[in-house]
Amino acid sequence: MSQSSASELRLEVVPPKKIGTNLLAAVCILLVLLIARSFWHGQIEWSVVKENLFARPVLIGLISTISMTFAAMGLGIFLGVGAAIMRMSENRVIRYIAIGYIWLFRGVPALLQLLLWFNLALIFPTIGFGDTFSVRTVDVMTPFVAALLGLGIQQGAYTAEVVRAGILSIDKGQAEAAAAIGMTRFRTLQRIVLPQAMRVIVPPIGNETIGMIKLTSLASVVQYSEILRKVQEVYYVNSRVIELLIVATFWYMVLVTIFSIAQFYIERHFSQGWGAARTSEKTKAEVPA
C-alpha cells in the first residue's frame, strides 16, 4: 500500500473534550426545545397575550418604568460621584460621612428602603421649617417620590464604589503633574482624571442601569404604576395571571435588549484609542533598541 493510500485511510481522531462539548450543546438545545414545546402546548391563552401586548395600561406602565429608570439612575450617579469624591477626601469628617452613607444604603434591602420612604409620614406627619413652611408628608411622599428616593439613594451607594474604583485606576502621577502646574483638585478631576476613568466606570454603570430596569418592579409595592403594577391591575380583573406576566416579561426583555445595545456603543466610544495605545506600547517594548 502506497503512502498516499495510507494517508487517505487514516481516521480523524476527535478529542474527548470536543465530544463532551458537542454532547453538552446537543443536550442544551434539546432542553430549550422541550421548554418551548411545554409553553406552546400549556394552558396559556396566547390570544390574551397578543391582545394586551400593546394595551394602553401596559404602555403607560412601560413609560413609567423607563422614566423611573432614568430618574433613579440620574440621582444615583449624582450621589455616587459626590460620595466617591468625599470618600477620597483628606478631611476625616467628610470621608467618614461618605463611608457611612455607602455602608448604610448598601446594607439595607431595596424593598425595605422603598417601604420606609413610603411610610415616612408615620413618624414625620409634616415636613418643613417650623411654623414658617410646613407641608403634609403624605402629600409630598407620593409613590413616584418614594420609589425615586428608595432606588436612587441606594444606587448612589453602589455607584460611589464604581466611581472610586475608576478614579483609583488612573495613575497618581497625572494628578501630581496637574497640581504642579497649578490646577485645582476639582479641575484635575474634571479635565484629567474622570475622562480617563470613564473607560472603567461605564461598563459597571451600564450593568447597573440594566439592573435598575428590573429593580423598578419593586416599586409596585408602593403603588407606583410601573409595568408590573399595570399588568397586575389587568389580571386582577380578567384572572389571566400567566398571560399578563408574559406580557410584562416581553417588555422587560425588549428594554434590556435596547439598553444592552446602547451600552455596547457607549463603551466602545469611551474605549476609543485605548486598545491601539496598548498595542503600540507593546510593539515598542518588543522592538530591540
Image (tube, helix red, strand yellow):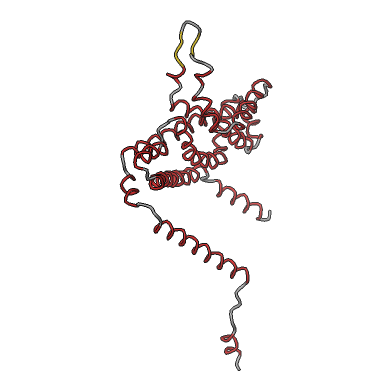
Splitting the image into 4 quarters, where does residue 200 fall? Answer: top right
Question: Going by the image, does 258 lie left or right of 53?
Answer: right
Q: Nearer the viewer, residue 257 or 144?
A: 144
Q: Residue at x 56, y 86 (%)?
A: 8
In this view, the residue in front, 283 or 125, is 125
Q: Residue at x 66, y 55 (%)?
A: 286
Q: Residue 132 placed where, x, y %?
A: 47, 6
Badge count: 0
The relative height of residue 262 versus residue 180 in the rendered view (above or below) is below
Question: As rendered, which of 99 and 7 lies closer to the eye?
Answer: 99
Residue nearer the viewer, 85 or 46: 46
Q: Which residue extends farthest bottom?
A: 1
User: In percent of the image, x 46 and y 46: which residue is there?
Assistant: 260
Q: Give x and y (percent) for residue 130.
A: 50, 7
Q: Position of residue 202 (x, y in %)?
A: 53, 40
Residue 32 in the image: above or below residue 152: below
